[in-house]
Each structure stands twice: as C-alpha cells, then as structure tokens.
Image (cartoon, rainbow, N blue to C red):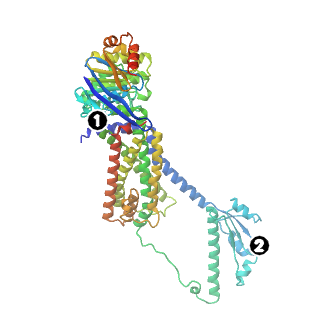
Amino acid sequence: MNLRPLAIVYRKELRDLLRDWRTIMSMVIVPVVVVPALILGILKIVSVTMKERPQVMVLGAEGSPETAAALRRLKKFDFVPAGPDYTNLISNKKIRAAVEIPKDFDAAVEGDRKATVHIYTYEGEPKSMLAAQQLEEFFQHRRQAMVRRRLLERMLPETLATPYDIQRTNVASPRQVSGLVIGMILPYLMIVMCLAGAIYPAVDLTAGEKERGTLETLLCSPVARTHLVLGKGLVVLTVSLATAVLSVSSNGAALVFLKSGSAARLPLALDPLALAGVCAMMIPLAVFLSALAVAVGLFARSSKEANTYLQPMLLLAIVPAIVAALPGVEFNYGLALVPILNISLLCKELLTGACHWGHVLVVFGSMTLYAALAVAAAVALFKRESVLFRT
Amino acid sequence: MIEASALTKIFHDRKRGQIRAADGVAFRCEPGRIFGLLGVNGAGKTTCLRLLATILRPTSGTAAVNGFDIVREPEKVRASIGFLSTATALYGRLTAYEVVEYFGRLHGLEDGALRPRINALFETLEMNDFRDRRCDKLSTGMKQKTSIARTLVHDPPVMIFDEPTLGLDVLTARAVLGFIRDCGRRGKTVIFSTHVMSEAEKLCDAIAIIHGGRILADGTLAQLRQRAGVEGLEDIFIKAVEEHA
C-alpha cells in the first residue's frame, strides 16, 4: 500500500480540523479545563458542606441540665431555641435535626431506669443525616463512658459489657487499594473521552463534508477511496486518543492536587507497568470507537442526523463501563468477548495486579478483531454510492 | 478525448422504483473542442458527468476518458480530468493556496513542480491578493477562481464542467465561460453541461440534447439546425423533446 496519499489526506484533515474552535473545545478545553474544574468544584462544595455546622434544636433540656450542657459544649452544632414547630423547620431545611431529651433523663439514667433519646431528622437529606450521625455519636460516647463508670463503681471488669473488640485490618497493598478505586474510574473516563473525542471530528469529516459539498471535490481526486477514508479515520483516532490522554492527565493532576490538600487520605499508588497496559488496551478500543463513529457519520445524510445516531451510541458505551464497576461483576472468558465491557474489566484487573496473560490476550485479540471489523465497515460504506450520495 | 458508449446508470428509489438517470448515452468529444450537454434540470446531465469523472459507477456501458476506461481504470481517469461543478465546494478553513496545494499533492505533484505551477496559476487567474485568505472569507468570484485553479493544478487534458455558472453573477459567469473557451483553445477536451441555451449557443463546438437520461440529438449547431429545420437552439431543443415525448 502506498502511504503517501494517506499521509497527505491525514495532514490536511488534521490541519483543517484543528482550525475549528469546536475541535479545540471538545479536545482540549472540555477535558483539560471544564471536567477537572467541575470535579474540583464539586469536591470543594462537598467539603464546605461537610464543614458547615448544622443547626440543631434541643427539646426538653430543662429537665436534664447536665446532658444538655454537655451537648451544648460541642462546637459541632449551632443550637437554636426550642420551639413546637421543629418538624416543619426540619422539613423546610431551616434546621437539620432536633434532639428530644426526656425531662427526667439525667435522673432516670442515674437511677438505672431505661430512658430513650429521640432524634428527629429529614431521612435522606445529607446534611440532616450528618447532624443525626453526630448526635448519635455524642450519646453513644456518653453511654459508653457511663457503662465504664458503673462497672468501675461495682468493681466489675470492663469486659463484662464488652467481651471482645472487632478490629478490621487491610491486607491489600496500597497499589491494590489504589488499583481498585482507580480501576473503576479510569477505564470509564477513558472510554467516555475516547468516544466523546471521536464524535465531533467523525461527524465533521463525513456528514459535515457531505453537507458542505467538499466530499464530491475530494472524490474527484485520483486517490483511492480506501486511502481517503483511512486518512479521515486516522485523524479521528488521533483526536480521540488526544482527548482521552489529555482528560486522564488533567484529572490525574487534579487528583494529585487534591491529595496535597484536604483529601490526603486518597490512595494514590499505581504500578506504572499496569498503567502502560491500560494505555495499550485503549488503542484497539479507540480504533474501534473511531471507526464506528466514522461509519455512522458516513451513513448519515447530515451532521444533525449523525449526531442523532451518535449520542445514543455514547450512552451505549457508558453502560458497559458502569457495569464493569458494579460489585460482583468479575472477569470471565464470556465477558472477555463483550466489547468495551471486556476492556473495563481487564483494566480493573491490571490495576489491582490480579491480571493473567490469558485474559490480556483474549481481550486484546477480540478488541483488535472488532476494531478491524469497524474499519472494514467504514471503508465499505465509503465505497458505496448509495451511502455517499444518500439524500 | 472522451468516448461514451451505451452509458447507463440506474438508481433504485423506494418510492419511485427504478430511475434510469442515464440510458444508453453515447457521444464523442474531441480534443480542442467544447462539447455541450444541454438539458433541463433532472435530464441526467450531472449523472453523465459524474460517471465520466468516476464519482459514480455505470450500471452498464462504459466510456473512455483520455484513453482510460472509467470502469477498469477509474484512478487514471481521475488523474486525467479537472472536474468543476456547483457541488464541488472548497474547504472553508483552508486558504485558497492550501486548497490548490492539497489537490496538487493528491495528484502526485512534488514540491519542485507544484510551487511554480501554483504561482503561475495564481498569477494568470489574478488570485495573489487573496491567496492566504481562508476560503470561507472569499467572495463567490474568488471561490470560483480558486475552484478553477484547483481543477487546473495538475494540468489535465480533459475538463468536465457541470453547470459551472449556476448561481453566479454576470461578471463571474462571463469570466468562467471565458476560461472554458480558453481550455478549448489550448487543445483540452472540454465537456460542459448547461440548461442555459445562450451559453451553449455561444460556447460549444458540438452539442448533445439530453432528456430523460437519453441523448435525443447531437452534432454541431449547424447540423442540429439543418436536421430540425429551425434556427434558434431553444426551438431545436423543444422540437427534439417533443418528438421523443
């Protein structure tokens, strides 16, 4: 195959595409600026929300001054004066929770009588749930302290109330922990960005050319149609991979930035070889998605029609990426043949260090086959008059 | 030289069934002469020219363009032609120079031959004022000049023009017709489709009247007048169409 015409088409199409601000927007601005800014922004909002002191109402405190005073000493809450309309205030998010201490609570617990503290919340409302959790922790600590004091007074061992402790120990290496967390996010991000990056150039270079009338000009040239469509496909692949790489790099940088800040507990220890493996797996996937986007773009009569087909395709690609992240979905040779899902599952295995060469070969082989079929479909469509001159 | 024999193209349409856009079309265009394909909209002119340019494949029949068969040697045919129509637009995000350079490269021209060729074309067509301007910023006349330079960059022996003056203002259309005449003078084989009788009358050395995908009459203007027994090309055209109705 003479590669010169292909290189000429590639250079021209890339130059043409990079002069379009919409390409720059989808390839650079969105993945490098918008997505990390959104993630950082959301995390900042969550962090601010978590630090916010919830407003809480204490009911019946007058009969139990000791407990009420201990509660009020906590800096975690903003206390509001007691009133009868606390349910409305909680429902309308004016306050986050109310705690009702029985009137004779202090006397009851000192007299070994059973007493119940009521916490009123807005079920499912995150700030209300957080306030309730903090109130529960306060009362649990007081109860434990009380039990310890009583046992001490009666000269009884502490193990009478707590016969044994439960301790959880992580045996997975930091790389495995990181791999599990990042293995769920990274393939999803790469799949979505690969396809999102491919859609605009694929539509512009196929259906867009039909609309603008430049396709017929191009078909007058002596270059074989296979070279023309492969040149276009290579440009789409370049933009797709560039979008994915830029997106992963910028989000990775955002993660490192977070780690140096408030979210220092985030695991961040990955095997460079596993990361290289993930990147290698993305190549047949990107070829597959780019060729599919080109084939769809060629089939469509207009850019609008192409986008109508490709937007659901983006959703279809997201589903297997999400399925792979679900608990209980593990790699097997059946799933290794399902495009996109196989890549997601394998990447999870690669990043947690649990991967076998057999899995790598099956997934790489099947994805390469799908990619080749998608390229063949795009080439075949480009040779069909009924598709090129579809009106 | 273009020689079409029994050139047929059938399209399949779900609603209308089979459409014979070109039905046994046969004609011969000589080098140095301008051959006009005259027909109303939908007569089959564009299909015939697209078949000659190998953009479409014939259902049956064939044609030889510059000695190359359109079915067996489509790439050699395309290397021999310059095809200009209202459907062959320019890349809006490339400059006039880049468009012409791109097509020169697609035709296999190397830098050493390409640069002087483009410079000469830009000089002749008076395009130097806008050579580095993007095509989407060009006026219609400038775009048409750029398209002409694009078709001529590889100096093809055969020129195919599909309604090249459609939608152009009088001055630009006049310049385009002058350019077509010049191609004929320089010994190129020129085929030119139009539905404007006056253009065909002024420009063509030979004319074929096409209607419903079939050639109804062809020859020089004098021959057509003699056979039809009427003087004006419009009358000749109407008579040919009515006779075959």
The 10 Å Cα crowd at callout 2, few under 14, some 14 to 19, many 20 or more, is some
Circle 1 marks a residue in which chain?
Answer: A
Categorize mark 1 by other alpha carbons within 10 Å: few (<14), some (14-19), many (20+).
many
Q: Quadrant of residue B213?
A: top left
Nearer to us in this view, A250 or B222: B222
Q: Residue at x 64, y 89 (%)?
A: A154
Closer to us: mark 1 or mark 2? 1
- Asked if disc 1 and disc 2 are in contact, CB closer than 8 Å, the reply is no
Residue at position x 34%, y 53% in the image: A370
Residue A375 visible to an observer of this rendering: yes
Q: How many marks?
A: 2
Chain for mark 2?
Answer: A
The residue nearer to you, when weighing A352 against A370, is: A370
Q: Position of residue A354 (x, y in %)?
A: 36, 67
* Label 2: which secondary element: helix
Q: Nearer the viewer, residue A364 or A161?
A: A364
Q: Give how far across and how far down residue A334 sits, in percent.
A: 37, 63
CA separation in Å, label 1 and label 2: 91 Å
Amino acid, disc 1: Val
Q: Amino acid at mark 2?
A: Glu
Q: Can see residue A253?
A: no
User: Which residue is tagged 1?
Assistant: A223
From the top left corner, tell me how far across and down residue A126 is, in percent.
Answer: 61, 62
Q: Report the front residue among B206 and A236.
A: B206
Q: Which residue is mark 2?
A: A62
Reply above or below: B111 against A104.
Answer: above
In the rendered image, the residue lying farthest to the left is B67
Q: Against B234, is A373 above or below?
A: below
Mark 1 lies on a secondary structure that is loop
Instruction: Name the N-terminal-most of marks 1 and 2.
Output: 2
